[in-house]
Each structure stands twice: as C-alpha cells, then as structure tokens.
Image (spheres, grey):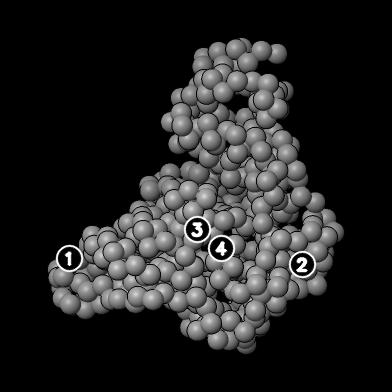
Amino acid sequence: MRMYDLIMKKRNGEELTTEEINYFIQEYTKGEIPDYQVSALMMAIYFQKMNKRETADLTKAMVDSGEIIDLSAIEGVKVDKHSTGGVGDTTTLILGPIVAAAGAPVAKMSGRGLGHTGGTIDKLESFEGFSVDMSVERFIQNVNEKKIAIGGQTANLAPADKKLYALRDVTATVDNMSLIASSIMSKKIASGADAIVLDVKTGSGAFMKNEDDAFALAKEMVDIGTHIGRNTIAVITDMDQPLGFAVGNALEVKEAIDTLKGKGPKDLTELCLTLGAHMLVLGEKANTVEEARRVLEEIIASGKGINKLKELVKAQGGNEEFVENPSLFPTASIVEPVLANEEGYVKGIKADDIGRAALVLGAGRETKESEIDLSVGIVLHKKIGDFVKKGEKVATIHANSVEKQKIATDMILDAYTIVKEKIEAKTLIKGIVTKDGINRF
C-alpha cells in the first residue's frame, strides 16, 4: 500500500477503504509517513470530504492509535459529557456532582485550558490541595465508592489525533466536518465511556458560529458514536454570550457552588439540568428526560449536589471547607466596575472578546507554558435583553494589574452592543440531535 495512491484516490473524489484509513493512521503515528504526504491527504479530504463510514473508520483508527481506558470495573453505565467549548463554561463542576448524586457513575477525564480561561482541572485546582494525579485503580475505586472522580487526560489518548490536529492547524485544514467530528469523538471513545452526551455550542463565542453548521457537526458526531456502538446524543446550545455571569477560574468555581446551592444564574442552571437529564436517561437512572430533570431539581434543592462536590474535593486531596466558605478562594487585589457609556438594551455581547479580556487579565494560557492566575476574571451584570442606564455597572473586573484592568475595561465595553429598541433574550437550547434525527426547538 502506498500513501501516494491514497492521496490520488481521495483527490479524485473516491472512497478510502477501512484498510487504507487504518494504514495511513498507523504508519503516520509511527512516523513512517512524512508530514507533507499527510498534509496533501488532509487537503484532499478537505475538498472531497468523507462519507459517514469513512469518518467512523477514521475515528476508530485514531482511537486504536493509543491507549484505550478500560472502565469495565466501574459498576453501571458510564456516561461522559463533552462540550465543544465556550466562555464561562463551568458545567462539569455542577453536572458531575448532581449526576453522581443521582446514582450515575461520573468517570471524567478532563484537560487543562489553552486559551481564554482554564480547563476543568485548572478550575478545580482553585481548591487548595486538589489533585487529579491518581492511579487508574484509585480513579476506578473513587467512582465505585463516591460515584465521581475527575482525572487528567493521559498523554497517550488518541496520539494520532494530536499529530493530525497539529498538522491541520498549520495547513488550513481544520475546518472540515469529518475531521473535527473524528477528532472530538476519538478522545471521548478512547476515554472508555459507554454513552456520550455532547454539548455543541453555536454563536459568537463558539467554534461553530453558524447554527446550521453546529447541527451538522452534532449529527456527524452522533452518527460516529452510533456506528461505533456508543449511545450518543447532542444538545445544541447558545454561545452568543458567555454562559452564566463569571469568567475566570476561582470566580467560575464560586458560581458553580452558588448553582449547586440553587442560587446560580438561570442559563447555567438550565443547561446543567438539560444535559444532566439526558445523562441520567442514557445512564439508565431515569426513563424519561422529564423524570430525570425532576430528580436533579430535587438533588439541588435537598443539598445532595453540594454535598457530592464536597465529597469529590475531599477524595482528591482538596480542602472541602472552600465549598462552605468561598472567601477562602484566591482573590484579586483590584476589583473595579465597568460602567456603561450609553443607555439602552443589550443586543449582543461578543463572547470571544469577553474571553480575550479574561486572557489579558491572566485567567487563561497564551501558550502551554503560561501560568494561570486563578484569582482574576470578569463578572458580568448585564446579559442580552437587559436594560442598562448610562453609568450603570455592566461588569466587574477582578485584576492584579492596573494596566491589564484598563485594557480589559475597554475590551468589555467594545464587546457590548447597546441599542434603543427592546431586545428579546436569547433561546439557550436550540435543539437535540439523536440517532433518529434532528429536533430543532
């Protein structure tokens, strides 16, 4: 088998066989095929596309390129959640505890952030002493005993995807539905989940800016999961503005604690109840989404959700006192309001710009080597549809540098679009995609 023949075949719009896909992934992972030939194949795929069978085969080949985590020793149906990313997306910190409190095992592999804010692990490390470093045996034991554990991603999970993504990133071939879907799903499947709930974002702060593209990506990923034998559904959700109010690590953790106590932002609470309900149904802990939602609402109201967060933090070496006393979290030395310079209704908030402002403050990483400042970030006070007076507070900046605070202030004001006419609030849940089709709301 020659790589030249695969490139020509795909360039001419023909299908690659399962064997051909396995060959190129295996040999490229081993370093036997040069980058320039794989770049040519990626460009051919970009223009000629892949069908559903090819996409599923590519995903499976990337799964098989490295370690596959065996979670069979965990009792029950393991349901994983994956978000395509956004600004202020702290759902795992709420979802994990409420789903675990309902009896469904949450065995979560999470990463560190690269970009405007930290990843789930960075946020959890706001708790003094919290660690994701544990053996697979300890991870499984924690899930069986506590119903929840959050571990760090192993370096050898789908290594072919890591190599391919780095190449696509510098050859203008990232933006292809099959390549995006297989990249996401290969890591989820290698993580050992029995079922997967996908939170596919759309809007200014999302990878998929266009709603139709978000539905198409969701369908592609659900089809892959179904083809490989994983029960998979996708929820399409709005990211035309940050989720919740807080953007920044310790600030987001405090908001997650508020939400688990039943005092969180409406949009964040709604998203967690929606995703969590689907996780319980796939995890066979509820028969219907409506029944599952009632169970989760009761878990929040009764305090079982917040108690489960304490259990998680304590089990992984963290100081659970932070849950009851959020003033223990790291705090910034400068807390300054951002005041509106005009009156009207909030028509839009460029979520990307809010994210970049948080990055300027130090809440995220510019490079993998960057140090995150857990204390800094932004708390929004006005969202789309809200009325704001001139001079009224639209946000509060938490900073450790006056210079950075001033830059972030300008960026936040630029991110807000304020108009005279009344604006309707955005719909958060856009639709659901299952193996049976697309249901738009």
Camera-near label (2 vs 1) is 2
Q: Is residue 390 above or below residue 407?
A: below
Give residue 410's position: percent from left, percent from top: 24, 62
Q: Amino acid at mark 1?
A: Val
Front residue of 333 and 440: 333
Task: Report the Cα–Cα distance between label 2 and label 1.
Answer: 50 Å
- Residue matched to label 3: 371
Q: Looking at the image, do the residues carrying marks 2 and 3 touch, with CB atoms under 8 Å apart?
A: no
400 with respect to 323 (left or right): left
Task: Report the Cα–Cα distance between label 3 and label 4.
Answer: 10 Å
Whether residue 314 is visible here, answered yes or no, is yes
Q: Which part of the image, by quadrant, shows the C terminus?
A: bottom left
| Residue shown at the point (69%, 24%) measured from the top left | 27
| Residue shown at the point (16%, 70%) measured from the top left | 341
Q: SS of the residue at dot 4?
A: helix
| Residue shown at the point (65%, 46%) measured from the top left | 187
Camera-near label (2 vs 3) is 3
- Residue matched to label 2: 143
Which quadrant of the figure has residue 316? bottom right
Q: SS of the residue at dot 3?
A: loop
Which quadrant of the figure has residue 388? bottom left
**Label 1, residues with CA under 10 Å away: few <14, some 14-19, many ≥20:** some
Q: Which mark is residue 419?
A: 1
Task: Report the Cα–Cα distance between label 3 and label 1.
Answer: 38 Å
Whether residue 85 is visible here, answered yes or no, is no
- Residue matched to label 4: 122
